[in-house]
Image (spheres, rainbow, N blue to C red):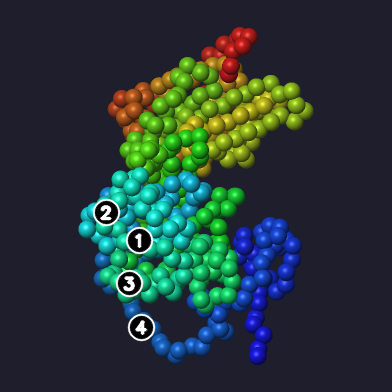
Amino acid sequence: MARAKVQFVCQNCGAVTPRWAGRCESCGEWNSIVEEMADTGIGAGPKAAKSSGRGVELVPLSGETEDAQRVVTGIAELDRVTGGGFVVGSAVLVGGDPGIGKSTLLLQAVAALGAAGRNTVYISGEEAIAQVRLRAQRLGVADTPVRLAAETNVEAILATLEGADKPDLVIIDSIQTLWTDRIDSAPGTVTQVRTSAQALTRFAKKTGAAVVLVGHVTKDGQIAGPRVVEHMVDAVLYFEGDAGHNFRILRGVKNRYGATDEIGVFEMASGGLREVANPSALFLDQRDKGASGSAVFAGMEGTRPVLVEIQALVAPSPLGTPRRAVVGWDSSRLAMVLAVLETHCGVRIGANDIYLNVAGGLKIAEPAADLAVAAALVSSLTNAPLPADAVYFGEVSLSGGIRPVVHSGQRLREAAKLGFGKAVTAQQPGAENIEGIDVERHGALTDLIARIAASGRPRESGDEG
C-alpha cells in the first residue's frame, strides 16, 4: 500500500514546509507547524485531480448587467457595513474576539429575516441547540421561524442544505469547528479551515444563498487560519470592542459589493445588541470640555463622518527613556508628529512621558487625525484647554505644513449638526463653506501651535493636564 503523503503546515500563516521546524520561516511564529495529511480534496493542487476536459464558454466583456440582489436584514447598522444587505450568492467572513457578540448579532439578524418571511438557517458548531435556544430567549426572538442545527461535518451540512428548501441566509458558527471527510486532520487546522470554507463558498455561488462564516481571531487580532480564506470570500467584517465599553463596532475591511472601512456601531444591552444611529454623540458623551489635552477629531469611517475625542497627557518623565503609550492610533504616526513639533515648531516635548488615547475604544487609521493629535499634545504640555466647540482635522507633513484631506464638507456638516461652531483645518482653495460653522484654515502647523501655547496657564500644584 502506498504511504499517505504528509505535509507540515504553519497554523498561523498557512505556509507549507517539507519537514517539521520549531519556527516558521514565513511568519516567525514558534511551535506553530503541525503535521497534516496532504490535501487531495476540495482545493487540492493540480496534480491531485484529473482534468475533466470540459471547456468553458467565453463571452464578450460588453453585455447586459443587473444589480446585485441583496438580503436586507432590517438592522440598519449591519446593512450599512455590508453595503445594503447580504448579496445573494455571496460568502461573508465575520471575525471577532470571543464573547464580543458575533453570535448574538447574527442570531438577531436571522431572527429579523425569519420574522420578515425569509428562509434562514443557523448552524452552530460550538453550542448545542438548547444553548442557542436559551440565547434566543434572552434576546426575545425565540418565536421567530429560524431553523437550527448543531453539526460540524461539512458533507452533512451541505447535504442538509441542498435537500431542504433553498435558504436565503445561512450562518455557520464557526468555521474553525468544521471538518470534512476529504481531509485527514483535526478541525481548526489550516487545511480543514481552507477546505471547509471553499466548499461552503462554492455552495453559496451555486445555489444563490448568502453564507456567513464566523471566524475566531488570533492574539494579533487577525482571523485565525490562512489568509487565503479572506481572499476566497466576498466580504470580511471585524467585530471590535472591549470589556471596558458597552458598545461594539462592526468594521468592513473587504467588500466586493460595497465600500470598505465602513463601520456600524452597536451597544450591548441586556436584550442584545442595540443599534447606535448617532455614534458621534456616543463617543463625545463623557467629554470633559474644560480639560487640557482634549481635542475633538472629525474623522471619516467609510462613508460615515464620526466625531471622536482624542486625549493626550504629557507628563515629566522620571525615566531615562520616556514612555510612549498609544491606544487607538498608530504609534509610529505619533512619533512622526512629535518629531515635527520638535523640529519645526520648537516645542520641547520629547523628554516627557506621552500618553495618547482615542476615547471610546475607536481605532483610527487615517492621517487626518494628525492635526487633532498635535493640538491635544501641545494643549496638555502648556496646560491650555482647547475651545470646547472646535473640531480639528488635517494631515501634518514632515515639513511642518498642514495638508487638506478628503470629504472635508461631510466632516464639517457632521460637526455643525452636533452643535460645534468652529473647525480648524488646512488651507484648501475652493473649499465649500458650511452654514453655522466658522472654519479656521492654516497652512503651517507653527501658526496653530503658537496660538495654543500662548493661551497656556501655569500649572498649579495637584493640577492634572
Dot 2: few (<14), some (14–19), or many (≥20) neighbours within 10 Å? some
- 87, 294: nearer the viewer: 87
Question: Which dot, 3 or 4, sits closer to the camera?
Answer: 3
Mark 2 touches mark 3? (CB < 8 Å): no
- Spatial CA span between label 1 and label 4: 39 Å
Which quadrant would the N terminus be assigned to in this image?
bottom right
Which quadrant would the C terminus be assigned to in this image?
top right
Q: Which mark is residue 144?
A: 2
Q: Residue 342: x and y, percent?
A: 66, 28
Question: Which dot, 1 or 4, sits closer to the camera?
Answer: 1
- Residue lying at 35% horizontally and 44% vertically, measured from the top left: 138
Dot 3: few (<14), some (14–19), or many (≥20) neighbours within 10 Å? some
Amino acid at pointer 1: Leu
- Spatial CA span between label 2 and label 1: 11 Å
- Spatial CA span between label 2 and label 4: 43 Å
Residue that badge 4 annotates: 57
Q: Which quadrant holds residue 21?
A: bottom right
Residue that badge 3 annotates: 207
- 31, 123: nearer the viewer: 123
